[in-house]
Image (cartoon, rainbow, N blue to C red):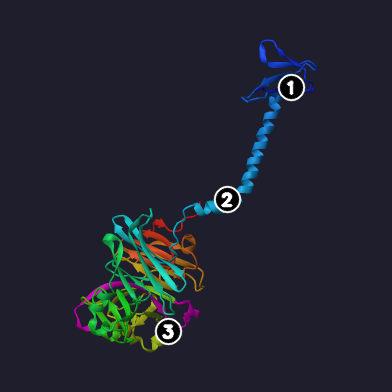
């Protein structure tokens, strides 16, 4: 076997005549042009490779070119390849589960100094609505208890989820206008109490229940229940009483006059009647007042709808004996006050008209109210916290000062906790948790960045 060796050619002039350089066995010199070049086998069998000897300084100019070319190649590869690979990479990444849209929420105090938020999320698939009821700690988002899953077929009678709050701190959740659930605070979960509702009142609800809704604001601690027979009842959850809606006023007046009574303080906006000062009923002008109400011991409370007039109103001047004088030249109807069992009516300073006013929520120390300072619908909406004992204002903010509350404030609602208030811009938009002095405990809409 023979090994063929290619002629050694000078890389500069191409001459095949060269000779080794003394003391450098791999270095040769061209006989024609005198250039030196390196002889290297690179471990290649059966042939000899010639490597060009770089002139001094040549490496400094060639290396950057190689690096630039490599960088350009990488950039081009990324520019071309990433758009093609991204859909595959995106699918490979884990995605959070889609539990749907927030439909209702509330907050309660689950231990000293710590609060929990209840969320009801809705996800629709075809004609079915799937709900997830979860409880998590406010601030860190830690899940408390096991989420509840419910599904209902969507019909024209489907109802959104709604919470009902009671003066003892208990919370009920009404699902689809039919399912009644009670919050169990000790393990942060909801349990069904539909049977308990029917079993409490078998004579009225024994045929079954067709619809459940939170009671009206004038009927504290109540549910509005429609039986399968079509009759509507007001069920007072805490006192255990049930009254046909059609007989509610008469039943309450009888209880107020015949049973031993206890006084319960209350704040309310009284609407201004009479057309003086160019007042328009559409702007709902009113004055804030405070009173105590006699209710039958162990019985339910029914709040009246109050009205005031100016003392110089023609209707008042024609029958002054039919009105009870208040401060600042205002009066209120005597018969309505007596039927409602009211005592100690007093207007809350300042005695100025407030428009579209409402008492949003109250606890033992504070009362949260909202009102407009002008008749214009979207102007001057104000939130205030009042001292429940004196009626004095302890905190006040315009909605412009609270960017967490979105919209005009027309759908603003609140839930009272023993030492705080949970505010929502609308049922699906949590806003703030504030303490009894108006300090923000948690912002549910923190600014981006």
From the viewer's side, name the closer residue of 422 and 419.
422
Q: Residue furthest front?
A: 1
Q: Are marks 3 and 2 in contact (CB under 8 Å)?
A: no
Quadrant of image for the N terminus = top right
* Horizontal side, residue 266 vs residue 313: left or right: left
Q: Which mark is residue 313?
A: 3
Residue drawn where x is 50% and y is 52% of the image: 92
Q: Is residue 185 above or below residue 315?
A: above
Mark 1, residue position: 7
Disc 1 or disc 3, which is closer to the eye?
Answer: 1
Q: Nearer the viewer, residue 429 or 87?
A: 87
Residue 167: x and y in percent read: 28, 69
Q: Which residues are magenta?
A: 256-284
Instruction: Bin the neighbour count of mark 2 within 10 Å (Cα to Cα): few under 14, some 14-19, many 20 and up.
Output: few
Q: Is residue 52 left or right of residue 431?
A: right
Disc 3/disc 2 C-alpha distance (Å): 80 Å
Q: Residue 61: x percent and y percent?
A: 71, 28
Q: Secondary structure at mark 2?
A: helix
Q: Is residue 91 above or below residue 200?
A: above
Q: Earlier in the sequence, mark 2 or mark 1?
A: 1
Q: CA distance from mark 2 to mark 1?
A: 50 Å
Distance between mark 1 and mark 3 Cα atoms: 127 Å
Where is residue 76? Give x, y as percent: 65, 44
| Foreground label between 3 and 2 | 2
382 vs 160, nearest the viewer: 160
- Element carrying mark 3: loop
Q: Nearer the viewer, residue 57 or 27?
A: 27
The earlier-in-sequence mark between 1 and 3 is 1
Please identify the quarter of the rendering in which residue 184 is found. Answer: bottom left
């Amino acid at each position: 076997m023979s090994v063929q060796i290619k002629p050694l050619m000078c890389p500069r002039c191409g001459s095949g005549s060269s000779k080794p350089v003394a003391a450098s066995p791999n270095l040769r010199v061209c006989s024609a042009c005198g250039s030196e070049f390196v002889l290297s086998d690179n471990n290649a069998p059966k042939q000899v490779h010639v490597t060009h000897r770089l002139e001094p300084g040549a490496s400094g100019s060639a290396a950057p070119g190689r690096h630039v070319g490599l960088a350009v190649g990488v950039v081009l590869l990324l520019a071309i390849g990433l758009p093609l690979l991204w859909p595959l990479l995106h699918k490979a990444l884990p995605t959070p589960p889609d539990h749907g849209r927030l439909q209702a929420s509330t907050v309660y105090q689950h231990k000293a100094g710590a609060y929990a938020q209840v969320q009801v999320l809705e996800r629709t698939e075809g004609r079915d609505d799937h709900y997830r009821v979860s409880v998590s700690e406010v601030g860190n988002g830690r899940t408390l208890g096991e989420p509840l899953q419910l599904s209902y077929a969507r019909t024209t009678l489907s109802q959104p989820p709604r919470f009902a709050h009671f003066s003892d701190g208990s919370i009920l959740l009404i699902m689809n206008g039919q399912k009644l659930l009670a919050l169990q605070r000790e393990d942060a979960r909801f349990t069904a109490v539909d049977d308990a509702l029917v079993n409490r009142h078998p004579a009225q609800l024994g045929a079954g229940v067709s619809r459940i809704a939170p009671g009206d604001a004038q009927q504290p601690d109540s549910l509005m229940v429609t039986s399968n027979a079509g009759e509507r009842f007001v069920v007072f959850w805490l006192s255990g009483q049930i009254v046909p809606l059609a007989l509610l006023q008469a039943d309450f007046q009888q209880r107020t006059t015949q049973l031993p009574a206890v006084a319960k303080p209350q704040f309310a906006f009284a609407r201004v009647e009479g057309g003086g000062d160019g007042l328009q009923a559409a702007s709902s002008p009113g004055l804030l007042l405070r009173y105590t109400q006699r209710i039958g011991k162990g019985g339910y409370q029914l709040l009246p709808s109050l009205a005031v007039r100016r003392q110089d109103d023609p209707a008042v001047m024609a029958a002054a004996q039919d009105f009870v004088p208040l401060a600042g030249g205002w009066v209120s109807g005597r018969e309505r006050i007596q039927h409602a069992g009211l005592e100690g009516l007093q207007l809350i300073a300042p005695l100025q008209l407030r428009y579209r006013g409402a008492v949003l929520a109250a606890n033992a120390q504070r009362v949260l109210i909202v009102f407009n300072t002008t008749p214009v619908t979207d102007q001057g909406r104000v939130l205030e916290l009042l001292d429940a004992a004196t009626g004095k204002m302890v905190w006040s903010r315009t909605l412009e000062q609270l960017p967490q509350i979105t919209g005009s404030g027309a759908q603003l609602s609140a839930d009272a906790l023993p030492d705080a208030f949970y505010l929502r811009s609308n049922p699906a938009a949590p806003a703030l948790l504030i303490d009894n002095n108006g300090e923000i405990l948690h912002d549910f809409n923190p600014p981006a960045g």
